[in-house]
Image (cartoon, grey):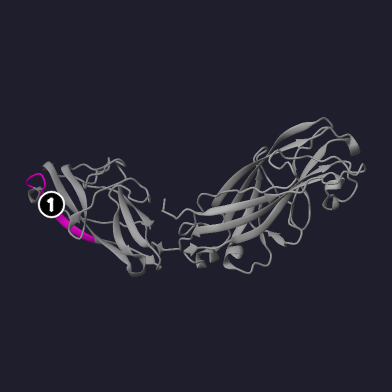
Amino acid sequence: MKPFTKSIFIMLVSWAGLCSSASAALSTCSSGGSPNGTGRYLMIHPEMIIPPNAPDGSVISTATINLPYSCPANIEGGGGFRFVVSNQETIAFKETQFPGVIAYKNGTSDFVRSVGFRLTNLETGKVITGYIDNNYAEWGPPTSSAPSSGMIRIKSELIKLNDLVYNLPQQLTGSHQYAFAHIMAVNNGCTLPTGLCWPRDGAFKWVFDNKVTKAKIRPQTCTIPNTDIPVSLPPIPTSKLPTAGATAGDTGFDIGLSCKAGSNVYVTLTDLSDNGNTSNQLTLTQDSTAKGVKLRILRNGQPVGYGPDSAQLNNTNQWLVGPSASTTSIPLTAQYVATGAVSAGKVKGVATFTMSYQ
């Protein structure tokens, strides 16, 4: 994992309840958190994570919220209430190539053009589709004519659409609010089109806005032209390794990089044959036949220790390569190292490397 400043993504929810006492008004559902029929909810995303080279379609933030509701007995129009969802009427959305993800048709900023939204009913697990262009999609099962109560459980996800997200400043500040969707509980006695059902017609509405107040954006940093780097050490006589600790066969190699400015580049080497190895000696593979010898990798003449295959900050034996703007390669050296009495044979070890941008 790369370290990111925590960000807050807030979803504001308000609703209008039945205010009229006219006898012709239809009954509505209500919410325990809003006795007056209006309310506000904050949906917190503790981190908005946009790692380098994130594939399009990646989830970059997730938040959930539970909204309680209570619906009275209702026998109008076949009885009960239906739950539907639509986008904000004044906002033009479009479907994207990613299932269930919508985006603005006419985005005016890199954030809006590069981030989409996905809405899921956590009660049913259904990803909601078909609710743009003022259409209404079913949110969940309707109630019966008997009194009922429950919870509207919502998951909202922010989705990376394209690499324009990397044009954003690394420290996104200020308030960025985006209209999104609304959910309605509608009395089945309302004979108007769903979008025209108001509180006196038995409609109860939760309105959603996505509001991003702070996010740490990480740019695309380094690409690695060749991730498979064979290193051939020269054959040597066993006499070159007379005692434990003796070394021979030093052979240089490079990990080539192509980097953009914006981060410090760190790397961890991992022993593929023994992932728990934190020493500076590389374990030989099972098809090796030599005895009393291992391999070492050196950086600037010093043996490099191995660590877990992780990009987490302060990973064991992780070390700084340098600023990404000035990093084009990582020069290293491989060598034999005697661990005891050496017998001739094949010597083979495999190490992996994990880049971290911090």
Q: Secondary structure at mark 1?
A: strand
| Residue 247 inside the magenta-drawn segment | yes
Q: Is residue 153 left or right of residue 234?
A: right
Using residue 327 as the reference point, say whether residue 59 is left or right of it.
right
State whether residue 70 is above or below residue 307.
above
Q: Between residues 179 and 231, which one lies in front from this camera angle?
A: 179
Quadrant holding the C terminus: bottom left
- Amino acid on which the number 1 mark rests in the picture: Thr
Q: Residue at x 40, y 68 (%)?
A: 261
Percent of width and height locating residue 138 = 76, 44
Taking the image as shown, residue 90 lies to the left or right of residue 323, namely: right
Residue drawn at x 59%, y 61% is: 176
* Residue closest to the eye, 144 or 207: 207
Q: Is residue 190 left or right of residue 263?
A: right
Residue at image mark 1? 247
**Does residue 62 show up magenta in the picture?**
no
Question: Which stretch appears magenta?
Answer: 242-252
Q: Residue at x 11, y 47 (%)?
A: 245
